[in-house]
Image (spheres, helix red, strand yellow):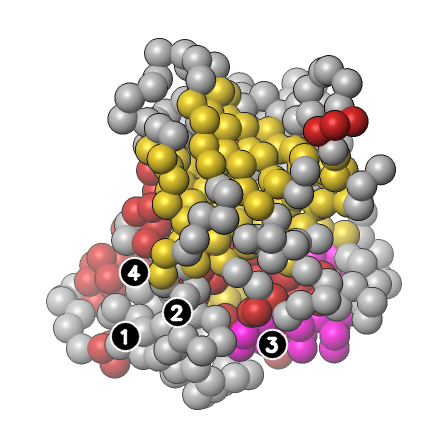
Amino acid sequence: MKKLICISAAVFYGVFLSFVIFAQAGELPPIEPFSNKDRVLVLAPHPDDENIGCGGVIQRAVKSGAKVKIIYLTNGDHNEFAFIVFKKRLIIFNSEFVAMGKVREEEAKKAMKILGVDESNLIFLGYPDYGTNNMFFSAWETNAPFKDMLTRQSYVPYKEAPSYGAPYKSEQILFDLKSILLDYKPTKIFVSHPADVNGDHWAYYCFLQIALQDLKKEIPEPKLYVYFVHGPGWPSPRHYHPELGLEPSAKHFPDALINWSTFKLTEDEIDKKYQAMLSYRSQTCVSAFYLLSFVRQNELFGDYPTITLNRQKSTLLKGGDAFNSDKRVSYAVVDDYLWVRVRKPQELRYRLFFRFYFFGYNDDVLFNKMPNIGVRTKKDRVVVEDMNLKKRLDPQGTSAQLSGEYFTLKVPLKLLGEPDFLLTCVITDKTFLPLDSAGFRKVRILEEK
């Protein structure tokens, strides 16, 4: 596995390190069983994520006669420390990182053969490891292609990729995803979590949400299962513990609304997942203690529920609270404004800042034409930016208010492109905002009651 992101994700890292997802008492419900009519699509940000999150699921789906296809967003060609240990020498030339991406591709083929998936059902898209989150922010339409820091590539460099030679542009990722979805028409999709601290992981989830929305009238709606990989102290304990299970513990997942489900592995499935993990020699040479800690009695899946907001008029509100009931971050739409309210400890007032990100989707506007809005705040001061255009904008009535219990941001829907739904998250440098509150959430905005 590649190491955690630290540059543009430096923005996210502070957020996500303060994250934690939520606990659910009692026995978790199982995921739906597979049948020979299923078409299972596993979306892996890097080679090895498919086994980390879904190694048992893949085996069971194959044994059930289901079709299984795995799509790798990147070849994992940016893990320079692991490559140095693996090669036992410094990796200097740009071409060597691309060559290591090929090594990881071959490792994935060996691993998936152990799990019963033929390499003809593996697709490596070849987008930049350590870069697809940056692409989601600002590699749309007229901007130059993203350029990878290590490979120095701005175009897909892998000849086997379906879009070999295509620019590192966000539209191209959407094109590839939509082409696969249209052709394969999956019944079940397994994808990385929107609260994962690794930027490629949350970016893959966000790209998928846009692709599915674009195709909602063209393919049947698939069942979505979301797996979590990177988080502070997750999983615990580390090292190989096949006798233990993965649970959304109270320590790591204190208070979100995620409805978790579980998949229990047989002894044979645990053993094959273990063998498949050892196939990733370029990664286990430095991270076996971490990677093997996912070889457990079960696999976990759970996504945030969509937040649905009705448009309200302040003149019609009769007391009560216009916001939804999330414990730490809540939302409302009142008088053509989106309101975001963050509950905070009362003593936190000075040196408190937030970053809010809003990616709006409008059914009548191409996504690459919609504004990508970032809002930076310090106390009650705001700065509004279009992240794709990389420039400051007129706030157009955006304002912030800091009180004893809450920080509240008000943003005009017009500034956000009059969205039908938003992918949004809130980031702070303080530790009071856990993972369940700060991950990317899908907020749907309905017409006025």
> Which residue was labeled with disc 1?
151
> Which residue was labeled with disc 4?
79
Q: CB atoms at circles 1 and 2 under 8 Å apart?
A: yes
Judge from the rendering whether residue 441 lies leftward or rightward of residue 2; answer left or right: right
Q: CA distance from mark 3 to mark 4?
A: 27 Å
Please name whichever residue, 243 or 183, is drawn nearer the observer in this view of the structure.
183
Circle nearer the N terminus (1, 4):
4
Circle nearer the N terminus (1, 3):
1
Q: Nearer the viewer, mark 1 or mark 3?
A: 3
Please name whichever residue, 84 or 250, is drawn nearer the observer in this view of the structure.
250
Judge from the rendering whether residue 43 lies leftward or rightward of residue 27; answer left or right: left
Q: Nearer the viewer, mark 1 or mark 4?
A: 1
- In the image, residue 423 sits, relative to residue 165, either above or below, namely above
Is label 3 in a helix, a strand or a loop? helix
Residue 175, numbered label: 3
Circle nearer the N terminus (3, 4):
4
Residue at screen point 45% across, 78% down: 142
Give the residue type at disc 2. Pro
Circle nearer the N terminus (1, 2):
2
Crowd tier of the residue under label 3, counting other residues whose Cα lies within 10 Å: few below 14, some 14–19, many 20 or above: few
Image coordinates of residue 101 in percent, x first then y, are 36, 72
> Which residue was labeled with disc 2?
128
- Furthest toward the front, the residue is 315
Crowd tier of the residue under label 1, counting other residues whose Cα lies within 10 Å: few below 14, some 14–19, many 20 or above: many
| Quadrant (top left, top right, bottom left, bottom right) of the N terminus | bottom left
